[in-house]
Image: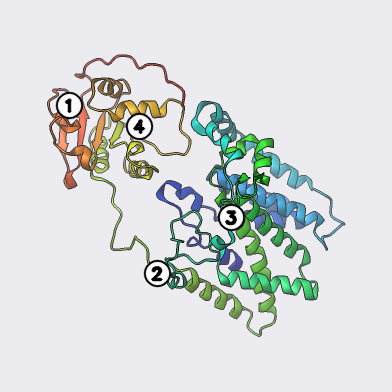
Amino acid sequence: MLCFRLTFDPSNVVYPLGHLQILSFQAIPLALLAQIRLRERPGGPAMLLFVIACLAQALVSWYLAVMLAVVLAVVAIGQRVAPGSSPTRPVVSWHEVLAVVVIGAVLFPFARPYARSFSDSTLAERRQLVDTFGDAVGWRDFVTPPAATLAGSAIDANPYSIWGENTLYIGAVPCLLALVAIAVAVRRREQVPWTAIGLVLVAVGFTLALGFFSPALGVRLPLGYLAQALPFLAGLRAAQRFALVLYVGVLLLSAWGVAHLARRTRWPWVPAVLASCLFLVEVFPITLPVSASRRYRVSAPDAFIAAYQHAHPDRAPVVVLHLPIHYFDQSYPVSEATYMVDSTAHWARILNGFSGGVPSGFMARMKALHRLPAPEAVDAMLALGVDILALHGPAAAPKEGGVRDYFTRQSWAAVTPLSGGDAVVVIDRARAPVPRPLEPLPGP
């Protein structure tokens, strides 16, 4: 299990709040181990473990489902054609076939709406990336320690923070262990098949992480050709995340490296413990904008909504609109994701949301609501059945002509000031004016 810890440390790849799901890739090593066991010892228990591990990972996000499929495909092919692989086993066992069928059957109800979303959401715009986006990563992204680490802090003007999607540092320890494995395979002909598989995974991961098209070379990259053949791959905008495939390659190589060192020592556990400690020192973030002293709390409006629903169970779940709508004041509106996270305090139905692909008409609705308290925006709010307006920061300012001022003067709304300058507006829909019907949703 050491090798899993060596390359799958969460400090290697850290994403903003809007992409927390990308950090949940811990089932990839388990799925890989289950695949190896299923190939070497076909049977019901191995098949069940493989199915559970794959589904546990694939259902986290579409990105991780595709990356897991790439890893498993490379390993499956490598197990059959790599130098030194066993020629006596069948190409595929019926346990493997059944496992793939079960996984496909479970994932199909989720994959089908995603594929359909290319025609009814802004995901369709991502198909343009096939001809434009590429050269997303470089070798320095993988070998430069981030500024938040001890080694990274010693680099002047280090451009790699802990938060960037190009902060893809592998770590010197797993790389050195991988080199040990390669040297042993070359000189002693040990674990040649798995060394070859590991190197192929590194090459495939780096190539896919480059993106769809290389502006520098003026040529389409392999991921671009794959997206032509399988159009849904065009939805994978952040190609850098394919670095996870490269990490799996380093994982395999570093595993054989530490295993070789363990066999050559009197106490086999020493290399494992030493490598783990060195790796932790190497990648441990010594400076982060978070700490135990800065406890995360849900916003005051969300705490109010939770208490309100508890006091009015007959009205739960209420419909909530948060203001401001950050699509119009942030180039990358991760604050909309904060609204989504805080909604877990009450699970009300919030109109706000954050995603790289939104349903057709969503932004038109948001633009209308963003104009509150304009009459057409109030009509849209009432037509959508909003029960509570959550006003954050500047949106809650009691300035003349503002949202709070408008609803203070309405007999069918009750404004409640909250701590920190926030406020909520509770709408009495029974007394509110009857809104005009919403117009049909326009295109994206």
Q: Secondary structure at mark 1?
A: strand
The residue labelled by disc 3 is: 244
Distance from disc 4 to disc 2, alpha carbons, whole Å, reads 38 Å
Give neighbour class at mark 4: few <14, some 14-19, many 20+ (Cα, 10 Å): some
Distance from disc 3 to disc 4, alpha carbons, whole Å, reads 33 Å
The residue labelled by disc 2 is: 286
The residue labelled by disc 4 is: 351
Is residue 48 positioned above or below 115 on the image?
A: below
Q: Residue at x 63, y 63 (%)?
A: 250
- Check disc 4 and give the amino acid type: Leu
**Residue 119: quarter of image:** top right
Q: Nearer the viewer, residue 302 or 158?
A: 158
Is residue 275 positioned above or below 361 on the image?
A: below
- Check disc 1 and give the amino acid type: Ala
Q: Tell whether 42 sits left or right of 252.
A: right
Q: Quadrant of the N terminus?
A: bottom right
Cβ atoms at labels 1 and 3 below 8 Å apart = no
Q: Nearer the viewer, residue 36 or 5?
A: 5
Disc 1 vs disc 2: which is toward the camera? 2
Most extreme residue toward the bottom is 266
Decide which of tag 3 and tag 4 comes sooner along the chain: 3
Distance from disc 1 to disc 3, alpha carbons, whole Å, reads 50 Å
Cβ atoms at labels 3 and 4 below 8 Å apart = no
Counting the numbered discs, the total is 4
* Residue 420 in sight in this render: yes
